[in-house]
Every structure is written in C-alpha cells, then in structure tokens.
Image (cartoon, rainbow, N blue to C red):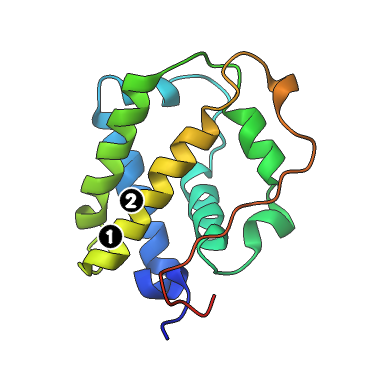
Amino acid sequence: MVGSLFEAVGGAPAVLALARAWHERCLADPVVSHAFSHPGQHPEHIERLAAYWAEAWGGPTTYTSSMGSQHDVLVMHSANGVHEEMDQRAIACFIAALDDAHLPGDPSLRRTLTNYFVWSTTALAAHPTSAADVPASPPLPHWSLPGSSA
C-alpha cells in the first residue's frame, strides 16, 4: 500500500513547485492568461493553490482551516461563462507543469494527477452563469492513488 497522493508527489515542496510551474505556464499561454488578468487576485495565489491541492491530495488541512472552503473556491470560479478552450489549455499547462516541477514520472501517479485536474477543471466550470448556483457547503474533494491508504 502506498501513502497519500500528497506523499507520492513529494509533499509540500513538490506541490508548491507544481503550483508555481502551472501558474507560470498559464501566464505564458495567450488564452489561459486571461483568467489571471483580472484585478483582485490574491497576492499569495500560488501558495493558496498549493495548499488547496495538498489538502485535496491527502496532505495537511491548511486550506480549509485557514484560507477558505470549497464553496469559496467554486464561487471564485463561477459566473465566468463557458470557457472550454481555456479549460483544455489549462489542462495542457498542468500536464506540462508536471515535468517543469520535476514530479515523479510514475505513470499511475501522472495519470491520477491528470485525472484529478481534468475533473477539478470541470467542477470549477460547473456554474458558468451565477455564483448563486454554487451549493452552500460542498466538501473539498479528496483524491488518492489506486491502492492508497489515504
């Protein structure tokens, strides 16, 4: 049995490196960068993203204990219309960022991370017209590797 997905990627330093690498790729993409061009982005966006992913992958509960909730995340990403091309390009940025961040090359790990990101991107786009459509208290989803103890 393996540990958590969080442990499999290499813990907090690896998750932070992935968040940085993904963010850099998104900023360099002419379509995805639009999502980061609006005023009001949190000055610690990358650290908060890393905390969110870490918690979703079986790591510490830093995000929900001190930064926000799944509801907050869904509201932040709601009412932005349909943006399928941007979503697909963000997924491609994530896949490339796995290498940029030097995450382990294990195919099962990479497949699980990619599946998580595809699922997450779809979930974040699920309320394109109104933040009022976001459920009041959705749980932060948790992902693990096949055969994981987490």
Vertical order, 3 against 17 (above or below): below
Helix, strand or loop at mark 1: helix
Front-lying residue, 78 or 107: 107
Q: Amino acid at mark 1?
A: Arg
* Residue at the image position 50 percent from the left and 60 percent from the top: 143
Identify the residue position indicated by label 2 in the image.
114
10 Å crowding of disc 1: few (<14), some (14-19), many (20+)? some
Give coordinates of residue 2: x percent, y percent: 41, 82
| The disc label shown at residue 143, or none | none
Q: Is residue 146 visible?
A: yes
Name the amino acid, label 2: Thr
Vertical side of 20 occupied by 75: above or below: above
Left or right of 78, for residue 113: left
Left or right? Give the position of 55 relative to 36. Answer: right
| Secondary element at tag 2 | helix
- What's the residue at 54%, 16% (across, down)? 80
Q: Which residue is disc 1 drawn over?
A: 110
Percent position (x, y) of residue 108?
A: 28, 66
Residue lying furthest right in this view?
Answer: 136
Measured as percent of width and height from the top left, residue 45 is found at 51, 42
User: Label 2 vs label 1: CA separation?
Assistant: 6 Å
Q: Position of residue 95 (x, y in %)?
A: 25, 47
